[in-house]
Every structure is written in C-alpha cells, then in structure tokens.
C-alpha cells in the first residue's frame, strides 16, 4: 500500500546544504512575487506552501515544521497588505500536520505527494477563509471549483518541484 | 507533569505559536478611522522581507528590461520611419485638438475660481517600475522600486497614462507597496461621466473593480466612462478609472453594484507614475504645453491653407495673424472655423437682429443698420463681408466698391465710432489687440486694390474671432466701441 510504505530510514539519512534552508524559501517568495506579474493566473500557485510541505515531509519534525511554516507564512504576509499572521497561522498548521503525517506515509511516492499537496492546499484555503472572514471581517470568496483547480495545480507543480529538490539532497551513506 | 509536556510537546508548541500569532493579529486589527499605515515592529518586518525580496527582483527586472531594450533598440527597428511619420501626423492633430480645448480649460479654471472649487492639477510625478506583487489572489498589492528616498509617502495616488492604478500603502526607503483599486479593501471616489452618478470604487473578491451600493438607474449603460471624482482626497479629479462593464444586484440589499473594466491594465503593469504633488492652479509645464500647442496649431493651420497669404500683399509686421496668441501673450483664445467664402443670408451671425425682424417680411427687405448719427459717415455695411467686420483686403470684391475702402469704416461701423478711418481702427484696436494687427495687415491689401485673387477669408484674429453682426443704428448712443463678439 502506497500510503503505508515506509522509507523513513532513507529519508533520515538525507540532508541538505544549510544554505538551501535559507535560499529556497527566499527564492520561493521572490519567484512567487515576480512571476505573478508576468504569468497569468500564476497567483493560483503557492510556492511558499510547496516549500513548507516539502520541508515538513522530509524533516518530519512537527515543531520545526510549525516554526518554519510560520516564518515563511509571516514573510508572505509581509508582501501583502494583510496583518502579519494570516498566512503564518495557515502555514504553521499545514507544516505541523504535514510533518505529523509524513511519519506515517511514504513521502517518496509521487502519488502520496500529489494527495498530500492537494489536501493541504485545500486545508490552507479553509484556514485563510476562517481567519479572514471570521476574525478579520474581510471579504473572501470561496468557490469550490476554483479551489479544487487551485489545489490540483499546486499538486501537479509540487510533484515536479519535489523531484527537482530531491536532486539537491546529498546522501549521508 | 514532566511527562505531560514531553508527551504533548509538539501540540503545545503548535498551540503556543498559533496563540502568539492570533494575539499579533488582534493587535494589528484597526478600527474604522484609524490610520491604515503599519507602525513599529510590523513595519519593520515588512521592511526586512521587502528588503530581502526586492533587490533580486530589481536585478531580474533590470536584466529583462535590458534584454528587451537591446532587442527593441538595435534589432527591431523595422518600420520606424513610417511610424515616426505617423506619430508626427498624430502629434500635429493632437496639437490642434489641444489648442481648441485650451480655452475651455481656462474658462473652466475661471469658473471654478468663481465657485470656490479647488481643482487639483498634477504638479509632479515620480516614475517607478513595478518589480513584484503580493503573489496571492487575496491581496492585490504591487511592489514598486521607489520609496521615501524619492519623495513618496503613504496614500499617494499611483496612475498610468491610461488610468488610475491604486495608492501607496507602506513606503520603505527604496521600495513601496501599492494597493490596487481592484483590492476589496481599497476605495476611490468615482463618478460616471454621463449620468454623473457618484460612488465608491473598490475591488470585489474576484479582483474586478466595482462601484458599490449604487441606486438602480436605467441610464447606466455598459461602456460609460468612469472618472475619479476627487472626493476621496487622494486621486485628483477627472482621471480615468475605467468603463462600465455591467450592473449586478447587490447581494445584501436593493442597491446595485456597477462592475468596471479598469482603464489601466492592472494585470500587465510595467511602469507607473506616483503623483507626489498636486496644486489648485494649472502647472507651469502644462501652461507651456498649451502655449506651444496653440502656436503649433496656428502653424499647422497656416500650412493647410494654400491661398492664405495674398502674394501681392505687403508683408505685415505681424507674422501670424491667424494665431490665437495675442500680442500680449494671451493664448486663451479658441480656434474658430474660417468665415464663409460667399456669405449669404444663411451664413451664421449674418442674420439681422431679432428686433429688426417682422413677421412675414423677407430678410432681404430689412434695411441694413445705419451708421451712428454723430459720425456723419455713410453706412459702410453693404455686404455680409462688411457686416462680418472683415478687413477690406479679405473681402470679396463687389464691383470694386470694396477696393481701397478704408478699413476704418469697417471698424467705425462695428464700433459705431464717428471718427476718421484711422481713428476708428485705433478705437477698435483698443478693444482687441489682435484686431489691430488684423486691420494693419489688411490695409495694404486694400490699398493695393484687392487684385482680384480669389480671396480666402481669413480666420479672424484673436479677439475678433467671430463675425461681427451689423450694429443697429443708435443715433443717441454714446460713441463707444463695441467689443468684438468673439472676445466675450
């Protein structure tokens, strides 16, 4: 069964150059901000969310994933006009849940990645909806078709990006 | 107790992090009326993140622009000459249009001054490049490469030549955030150009600007232009905001929302202008443009009138009597169409005064008005051209009667002044400096005998732009000059 296949030992023996942990989130934020100018509908994609999920999957440490997700989310908030913390809370929760789930599923499988990203993309939108609509009283449109398309687009792109990021990992064997 | 923390450590950390952020959110939420600007640590965090993200974006943007310019400036130069020619023709046409609108602009300014209304003119703008945006659908924010070091402050209007874009929000040293008009939290005072319905423009949840809470009105049609009203104290009045797309009912009530197609292409913004200074008077640069446009317009018109210059006429000291620029530099005079070559009773402004008309009486039987009683001069108006106050050198010869006729008669008739021809000229010139120049130029032509060339009537000079109506006989009227009609 795909979801129950364990490759945790292999994952635990991988590591990344320290600079990756800084460069990749910044690159995701910068590209997200820049490409949205030139590529139509690129704002459906959430590169910082993909980075958060990828980090949480491979570190599989809920605490660090929560902190990293929150920091990336707050940085994303800083580029918007929202109060700081909207994306921070959403990505913190997503990081925590992904890391907790990553302990139990095979994170190397592309199908698993597809499902995880698709699910947590919807989870993030739901959290944003609750925060902005309920807490902040700001308008937020929820349309199921649009959200499903957005989640699918993020999942497809995430699978490709995760495969590319896998090549940057160095083996500790 | 220790086992509790160790067992639920992950969940506790998550709760702690979320709680801290929720408290942070609560602190940042503003009540209505509070300044939207961020302060303290929030602004610092935004500045840090922007400082980290903006420089690479600026480099990438500069690289892309460099490659684009390289292609555009050195490779893609086909059809440049033809485009240049087209642009020059377009420029000439626009100069003419601008000149014709100059008087309206000044008149509007005078009326606004009378009404105490303060029009805001754009004095100074700062050009900035868009180097990024928020990257999310929930926040329509742009990042530009100019900040407080360039004189930008929060709540300054941001525009393109096509229309408004938004307003500055958080301003850092070398970059700024711009809140677009398509964001749900933005707001701009607008007015529909034709129906004069006012409203507040803001974005809906799909990122399309809409005028919210408008009373239903059948007159609102798609395609109607929407302009800024100036009521928000941010955008100057009269800037293009967009055109009406469609009207949709407001889900919360009986009002409607008017969806707008923005004039500026908000999804494709490369460069924007930040208005850093406005004023209540026409800026000097615009004034110079208007003056130049009117001078240029006169030159263009002169080129388009092939027989404008009488080849036998002695050159006048006034180079361009057609110009709407008066000798005193007054350029606030409109361009008028040339007068009719063969005036008849249907010619505008050639109809006798209504007081002289009688029911059933043909217009031809109405006696032309006589000259003023104290002048002793014969009635000089024998033709519509005379009635129009045209200089003699530019009238159509009528059996030679107009040849060599002192132009002062015309001025005398117009002004009702009993004086010698030259005195009459001077009297009329006292009303308009351009009329003096016009007659001064016309006199040599008249003295030369009006050689019989098919005379193209001149567009009246400034100050005497409209054809004069023959003044009714007023024997007891005091000797005074009637201002030219067009000078009113």
Image (cartoon, coloured by chain):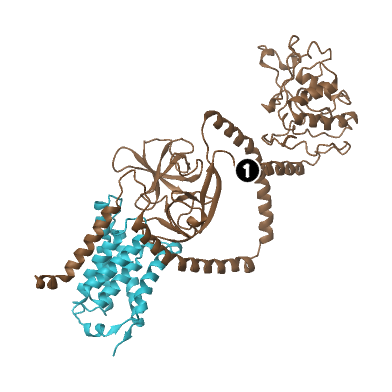
Chain colours: A cyan, B brown
Quick one: B235 or A141, which is closer to the camera? B235
**What x and y, as percent, mark residue B308?**
80, 38
- In this view, which residue lies farthest toward the front? B40
**What x and y, as percent, mark residue B356?**
69, 13
- In this view, which residue lies farthest toward the right? B448
Which of the 4 quarters of the picture holds residue B312?
Answer: top right
| Residue at numbered disc 1 | B284
Quadrant containing the N terminus of chain A in the rendered view: bottom left
Q: Residue at x 87, y 29 (%)?
A: B446
Q: Residue at x 32, y 67 (%)?
A: A72
Quick one: B231 or B441, which is closer to the camera? B231
As drawn, B358 above or below B181? above
As drawn, B85 above or below A18? above
Give the chain of mark 1: B
| Residue B348 visible from this viewpoint | no
**What x and y, as percent, mark residue A127?**
25, 60
**Is residue B148 rendered to the left or right of residue A128?**
right
Which of the 4 quarters of the picture holds residue A17?
Answer: bottom left
Q: Residue at x 83, y 30 (%)?
A: B440
- In this view, which residue lies farthest toward the bottom? A173
Crowding around mark 1 (Cα neighbors within 10 Å: few <14, some 14 to 19, many 20+) is few
């Amino acid at each position: 069964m795909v979801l129950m296949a364990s490759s945790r030992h292999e994952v635990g023996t991988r590591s990344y150059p320290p600079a990756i942990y800084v460069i990749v989130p910044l690159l995701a934020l910068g590209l997200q901000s820049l490409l949205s100018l030139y590529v139509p509908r690129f704002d459906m994609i959430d590169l910082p969310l993909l980075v958060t999920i990828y980090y949480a999957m491979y570190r599989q440490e809920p605490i660090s994933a929560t902190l990293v997700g929150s920091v990336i989310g707050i940085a994303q908030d800083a580029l918007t006009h929202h109060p700081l913390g909207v994306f921070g809370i959403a990505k913190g929760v997503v990081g925590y849940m992904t890391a907790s789930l990553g302990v139990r599923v095979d994170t190397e499988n592309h199908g698993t990645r597809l499902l995880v990203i698709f699910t947590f993309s919807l989870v993030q939108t739901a959290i944003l909806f609750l925060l902005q609509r309920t807490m902040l009283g700001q308008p937020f449109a929820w349309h199921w078709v649009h959200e499903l398309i957005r989640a699918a687009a993020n999942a497809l792109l995430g699978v490709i990006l995760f495969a590319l990021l896998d090549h940057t990992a160095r083996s500790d064997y | 107790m220790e086992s509790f923390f160790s067992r639920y450590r992950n969940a506790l950390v998550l709760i702690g992090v979320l709680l801290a952020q929720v408290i942070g959110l609560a602190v940042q939420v503003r009540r209505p009326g509070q300044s939207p600007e961020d302060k303290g640590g929030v602004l610092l965090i935004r500045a840090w993140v922007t400082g980290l993200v903006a420089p690479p974006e600026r480099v990438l943007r500069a690289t892309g622009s460099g490659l684009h310019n390289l292609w555009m400036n050195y490779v893609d130069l086909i059809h440049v000459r033809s485009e240049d020619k087209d642009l020059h023709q377009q420029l000439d046409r626009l100069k003419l249009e601008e000149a014709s609108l100059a008087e309206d602009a000044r008149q509007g300014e005078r009326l606004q001054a009378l009404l105490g209304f303060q029009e805001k003119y754009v004095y100074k703008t700062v050009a900035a490049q868009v180097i990024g945006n928020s990257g999310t659908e929930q926040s329509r924010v742009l990042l530009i490469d100019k900040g407080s070091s360039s004189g930008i402050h929060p709540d300054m209007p941001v525009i393109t030549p096509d229309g408004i874009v938004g307003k500055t929000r958080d301003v850092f040293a070398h970059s700024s955030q711009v809140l677009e008009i398509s964001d749900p939290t933005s707001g701009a005072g607008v007015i529909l150009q034709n129906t004069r319905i006012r409203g507040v423009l803001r974005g809906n949840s799909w990122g399309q600007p809409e005028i919210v809470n408008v009373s239903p009105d059948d007159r609102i049609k798609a395609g109607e232009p929407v302009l800024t009203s100036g009521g928000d104290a941010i955008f100057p009045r009269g800037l293009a905001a967009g055109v009406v797309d469609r009207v949709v009912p407001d889900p919360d009530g009986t009002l409607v929302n008017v969806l707008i197609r923005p004039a500026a292409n908000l999804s494709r913004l490369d460069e924007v202008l930040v208005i850093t200074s406005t004023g209540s008077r026409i800026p000097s640069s615009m004034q110079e443009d208007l003056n130049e446009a009117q001078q240029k317009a006169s030159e263009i018109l002169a080129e388009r009138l092939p027989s404008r210059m009488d080849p036998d006429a002695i050159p006048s000291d006034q180079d361009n009597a057609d110009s709407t620029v008066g000798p005193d530099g007054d350029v606030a005079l409109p361009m008028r169409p040339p007068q009719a070559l063969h005036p008849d009773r249907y010619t505008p402004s050639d109809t006798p005064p209504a007081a002289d008309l009688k029911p059933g009486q043909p217009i031809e039987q109405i006696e032309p008005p006589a000259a003023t009683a104290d002048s002793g001069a014969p009635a000089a108006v024998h033709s519509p051209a005379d009635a129009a106050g045209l200089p003699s050198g530019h009238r159509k010869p009528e059996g030679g009667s107009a040849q060599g006729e002192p132009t002062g008669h015309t001025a005398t008739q117009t002004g009702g002044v009993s004086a010698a021809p030259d005195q009459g000229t001077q009297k009329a010139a006292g009303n308009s400096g351009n009329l003096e120049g016009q007659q001064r130029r016309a006199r040599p032509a008249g003295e030369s005998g009006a050689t019989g060339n098919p005379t193209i009537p001149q567009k009246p000079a400034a100050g005497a732009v409209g054809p004069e109506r023959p003044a009714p006989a007023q024997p007891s009227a005091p000797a005074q000059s009637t201002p030219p009609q067009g000078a009113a």
